[in-house]
Amino acid sequence: MYILTHIGLILFLYPGNIIDSSSQGQWVPIIIGVIVHFIILFLLLTGLDRFPHQDIITIYLGAGKLMTFIFLFPTLLYFLMANIITVRAYSEVVTIVFLSNTPLWAIMALLLILSCYLAIKGVEAIFRTGILLFFLLFPLVFFILVVAFQNVDWHYVYPLWNEDFSFLTDSSYLRSFFAIGGVFLFIGFVRPIISYKRNKVLLAAVALIPIFIISVYIPVLTFGQATASTFMFPFVMTVDAINITWLMFDRLTMFFLLSIVIFILLFISLVLWMSVRIINKCLLPTMKPSYLVIAISLIIYIICLWIPNWSDVEQLFKWNTSLRFYVIFGVPISICILGVKARKEGES
């Protein structure tokens, strides 16, 4: 599940963000992002280990109302914005690639209805669906990642080193952290319901490293930095350029994007479920979770209808940057501190 929810974000928006932010030595910003990913993941897992039968919400509630408000309210707001951006952005891609004559409102409605249904069924249903989709679709995605190397020119890998670190403050690079920290927090929400081993989560994170690198370098090695930077979705364009004569299907792009969109449905449903958990435990404990899921989905849908074009989606990304960094750093650090405090109190 950890791999699937990240793949949907990595192979779509992430390559364009990295390529736009760095004109050479793209492995440097990639590795910096990966290191950040492991740091925040390690901090979160370390803190959660001190509370073996509690989720993030219960931990904050135990620490007091102030801590709950400081960290869970921004997290809820971030989840809502993440779903708004995801639904609107991926609906746009589906319109461009598959259903050019289908109105955008219908595609957004379909994405939210399917995600809403999964979220109502609960996190166990989401995970079971994820396991099934992994065996059905991940082999196809892996095959596409392999055959995408057919058009690469290894001369484009040079220069290897980037002496200019101005990308660290570039808005495109900051947006790339949506793929790095967009969904990892779910491991702190599912803990009381679904058990997992720390080492397996870290192993899944390690498995994502080559996907981070390949998603950026295949477009660069295929088209070159100058050309790849002109594409809105570089990896999608690379897949579209694949030509396999012995394959019975003309366009791999369609199957690739269908797989990614299905993975994104899991992401949206998981974020919806986490949002409802926060509201249900902190604000409206008597309301049925299913009603909350439907209400939040309607709010997301209405807001998505108000976003007229892609430039406004990118503007939302910029507005969401500060909140994103506050959540992906603030929550793991605070949980780790609370875990250390709980351990010291236990020892005393």
Image: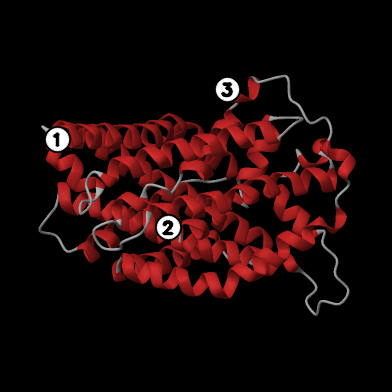
Q: Is residue 176 visible?
A: no
In the image, what residue occupies the spot 48% across and 55% down?
87
Point out the residue furthest to the bottom here. Answer: 248
Mark 1 or 2, nearer chain start: 2
Mark pair 1, 3: CA separation: 43 Å
Check disc 3 and report its element: helix, strand or loop.
helix
The amino acid marked with disc number 2 is Ile
Does label 1 or label 3 sit earlier along the sequence? 3
Location of residue 347 by image quarter: top left
For marks 2 and 3, the one nearer the N-term is 3
Q: Quadrant of residue 159?
A: top right
- Which residue type carries mark 3? Thr
Residue that appears at 42% across and 37% down: 40
Q: Is residue 316 above or below residue 210?
A: above
SS category of the residue bearing label 1:
helix
Query: In the rendered image, which residue does mark 3 sit on?
Result: 169
Towards the viewer: 230 or 135: 135
Task: Provide residue 194's location: percent of width, then percent of height.
Answer: 30, 63
Question: In the displayed structure, does residue 253 sit left or right of residue 196?
Answer: right
Q: CA distance from mark 1 to mark 2?
A: 41 Å
Q: At which x and y percent is residue 109?
A: 44, 64
Quarter placement of the C terminus? top left
Please name which of the two marks, 1 or 2, marks the residue nearer to the observer: 1
- Nearer to us: label 1 or label 3: 1
Instruction: Return the residue at label 2.
Output: 268
| Residue 347 circle label | 1
The image shows residue 308, relative to residue 251, as above or below, that is above
Q: CA distance from mark 2 to mark 3?
A: 28 Å
